Image (cartoon, grey):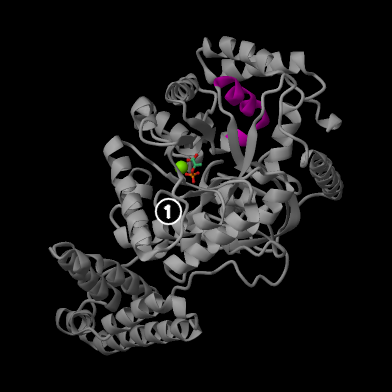
Amino acid sequence: MTASVKIDIAEDTILVGIAASPGIAISRSHLVNRARMSVVERRISPAEVGPEIVAFKDAVDRSKAQLLAVQAKIDNPELTEHLYIIDTHLLILEDEMLIGETIALIREDLINAEGALNRVLRKLRRMFDSLSDEYLRERRSDVDSIGDRLMRNLLGETRETLTNMEDQVIIVAHDLSPADTVQMDKSKIVGFVTNVGGRTSHTAILARSLGIPAVVGLETVTSLVPGNLPMIIDGSSGTVILKPSAETFREYLEKKQRYEYQELELLKFQDLSSVTIDGCELALRGNIDFIDEIPSARELGAQGIGLFRTEFLFMSGEGPPSEDDQYAIYRSAVEQMAPFPVTIRTLDVGGDKFVPEFNLDDEVNPAMGLRAVRFSLKEVNLFRAQLRAILRASAHGPVRVMFPMISGVAELRACKLFWEKARQELEAEGVAFNAGIKVGVMIETPAAVLIADLLAKEVDFFSVGTNDLIQYCLAIDRSNEHVAYLYEPMHPAVLRALQRVCEAADAADIEIGMCGEMAGEELYSLVLIALGFRELSMNASNISRVKRIMRQIELSEVRKILDGLMALSTSEEVVAALESEMFGRYPHIFDPSKI
Ligand code: PEP
Ligand code: MG
């Protein structure tokens, strides 16, 4: 965490970060302090024993009161599972081993309360990890969760949430999790800036879907900016201006108007077809993180949902949604989107999408850890509930299911086995579902690229997730601002990987689409159609932008350009050649004033 020393800020101080979500926000800063919990163990004097025990008991009482308050709010019968979890947590708070041993360590070994609690929690975790009974072993997550709550209460820490802001503000934070972004009230939070993050980190992706301008990767913004400072953020260029002068203020007000005007002009394209001059038809679909994005995705011209990121349903803080909850959501998505298909991706938690209840945040290397289907194949009850919910929703309109982060055929087959079991169960129960539902995989690991021919034999479609594929292919963390400059969609390694996947899909005659962020970048989308992608799924606000270009080019021309690009050695060369070819052939399309 950066130090909180603030320095005098001159008028019009400019900071440059990573453009994470377009648009301009002009407001005052709201500094969010999110220090990591740090536990310090120390020896205490006998005189401190009494007060330390009282502090610990207070923390236990506060934790109980919080849990009871959460429990009291749950009146939905479908959330009874969650009530049981809270009951378990309340029972743990009575547990002799947790409470008695902590007090004994304070009293007998003269260790301060947080140090003692920390020791006992470590011992309990080790104990749970060594159990052979899978069910009991899984209860470790309850111990983690209650231990975390207890420790926070003991340290007097509260996590500031981003709900209930009183005025319109720009959030300034070290980091924001996707769960934080989900909670943002757009009428109050008009933009945010962070020290860390990259363009394809999930916090940035969410900001784009919510239409909140954002600049990330500013490294030291929290140590420069105090609360309540007038500031401007330009999420399209990655610029932040602190203490804007009257002139700068006017300039950005104008830019904001121009941006909003262009966005409105682009709406003209929403009902037009996406077809190139020489007749190549494309399916432009929307990526969504929440069900309530569907009406606007439809309005913006999405022909279906190419990626429904279901993990955000698990980030409400109220525990995992039940099968019935999920069924209701997927069914509503399908009904709202019909006759176009909705591609539901199974849970992709882990990496930068941590769900506190799942306790995945202490992994050393989360991007390569227990993510996506690896998690689902371990938490099989959650997986089963999700697959059943997806199948049940398929009775109400076209649905496709898609497995994320597949790195081998065996893993895919394991997922398909659960899928098959869910189908058999529903059939035996007489519950309706569509037997012809298409099954696909995300191609987002280098392994999946290399074995695309083998994977193609097992599925109906591929959807390439370049956000992760680029991360793993080029070995750069998609959320790390220090290596963001290496995140290059036009890197020859990425282009070759994409070409290989297209060839495998073509040879097996299966559908091939892309749902990584790159699909929504106008210039790159041209390369993608030349490579053979016919379905591009993107943040719906980009659909008109991409469509506008597609309608004015010939695929045959773009294919010629691609041949030249594939022979180049660096990303810079590829981008320069692509720009000069396209701007040369179609100057009218790329002039922003012509939109
Ligand atoms: C991707 O990796 O490209 C993708 C679409 O999935 P996510 O961004 O959710 O990891
Ligand atoms: Mg991914």
Residue 157 drawn at (x, y percent): 44, 73
Please state which of residues 246 and 436 is positioned toward the viewer in this rendering: 436
Please state which of residues 380 and 459 is positioned toward the viewer in this rendering: 459
Q: Is residue 236 visible?
A: no
Residue 489 drawn at (x, y percent): 54, 28
Tell whether 191 sits left or right of 449. Answer: right
Residue plotted at (50% across, 61% down)? 313
Residue plotted at (50% across, 38% down)? 467
- What's the magenta bit mostly, secondary-structure-wise? helix
Tell whether 238 sits left or right of 451. Answer: right
Please state which of residues 232 and 281 is positioned toward the viewer in this rendering: 281
Residue 284 drawn at (x, y percent): 64, 37
Residue 524 forms part of the magenta stretch = yes
Three-letter residue code for mark 1:
Leu
Residue plotted at (75% across, 21% down)? 277
According to the picture, the residue beneath numbered tag 1 turns out to be 347
Name the image quarter holding residue 558: top right
Please report the bounds of the magenta region as a residue range.
519-531
Neighbor class of circle 1 (other Cα within 10 Å; few <14, some 14-19, many 20+) is many
Residue plotted at (36% across, 40% down)? 406
Indicate the quadrant containing the C terminus: top left, top right, bottom left or bottom right: top right
Please say if 96 is above or below 367.
Answer: below
Residue 21 drawn at (x, y percent): 65, 45
Residue 202 forms part of the magenta stretch = no
Please say if 534 is above or below 574.
Answer: below
Tell whether 387 sits left or right of 226. Answer: left
Decide if ligand 1 comes within 8 Å of the CB at mark 1: no
Tell me the SS state at disc 1: loop
